[in-house]
Amino acid sequence: MVIQDLKPSRRVEGRWLAVLEDGSILRLGEGEVVDFALYAGKELSEGEAEALTQAARRSGLRQKALNLLTSKPMSRRELEQKLRSWEAGEEEAAAIADRMEELGFLNDAAYAAQVVRYYSAKGYGERKLRDELYRRGIPRELWDEALEGAADPSAAIEEFLRKKWRGTLPDDPRELKKASDALARRGYSWSDIGEGLRRYGAEAESDE
């Protein structure tokens, strides 16, 4: 297999295009060009061609992972799942995730803190925050430190009730039940909900 042409990509910096004699194009990183000592006109053995094809595939996966992580944060587990959906092997996905961590594009602790800040700012309680950390595959040993950045639940509950009731305690007990249920769905504990309601002279009605 002969490399008919070897040229840098016009669209992606650091990427090279190797045009093979059968018309196929391999998209390579600079590392593959150097490692395989590639040049236009070089003839590859069957083994070299296969090795280069696999290297090009891995390089493509790394680039896709990098593009994904620079567009949105995610956990290591989420990245590895995405890589496997792109047909990366388990060890291959782990190796790429390791590299992304080395480069600083993947950081579960920082991501956990970001998830907590985001949902806490939206008015959600600790149970909801834990659900989100679990759903995103963040290791449990990182949860406690991340949850330290959550907003004070009493302040968040007070703000929720203030907006809902406009500072006036409703007469209808069904409205109190609706409010306490809504706060429970947002992940607040019944003890925190009860404390918040008592500031308005009310008592929470728990379904638990």
Image (cartoon, rainbow, N blue to C red):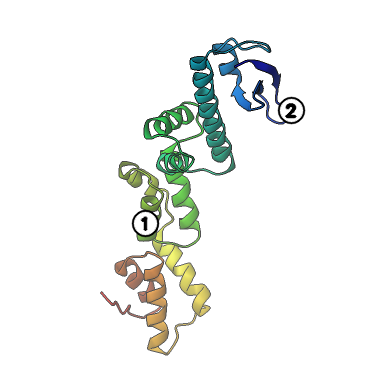
> Which quarter shows the C terminus?
bottom left
Q: Is label 2 in a helix, a strand or a loop? A: loop
Q: Which residue is identified by label 2?
A: 10
Q: In this rendering, is residue 181 above or below 51?
A: below
Pick the front one: 15 or 167: 15
Tell me the kind of residue under disc 1: Asp
Q: In front of the other: label 2 or label 1?
A: 2
Tell me residue 137's x, y (percent): 38, 46
Closest to the observer, 132 or 24: 24
Relative side of 125 to 50, left or right? left
Residue tagged by mark 1? 131
Considering depth in this image, is 116 or 135 the residue closer to the camera?
135
Between the C-alphas of marks 2 and 1, the distance is 44 Å
Q: Residue furthest left?
A: 208
Task: Determine the secondary structure under disc 1.
Answer: helix
Above or below: residue 112 compared with residue 51: below
Residue at (36% x, 51% y) in the render: 134
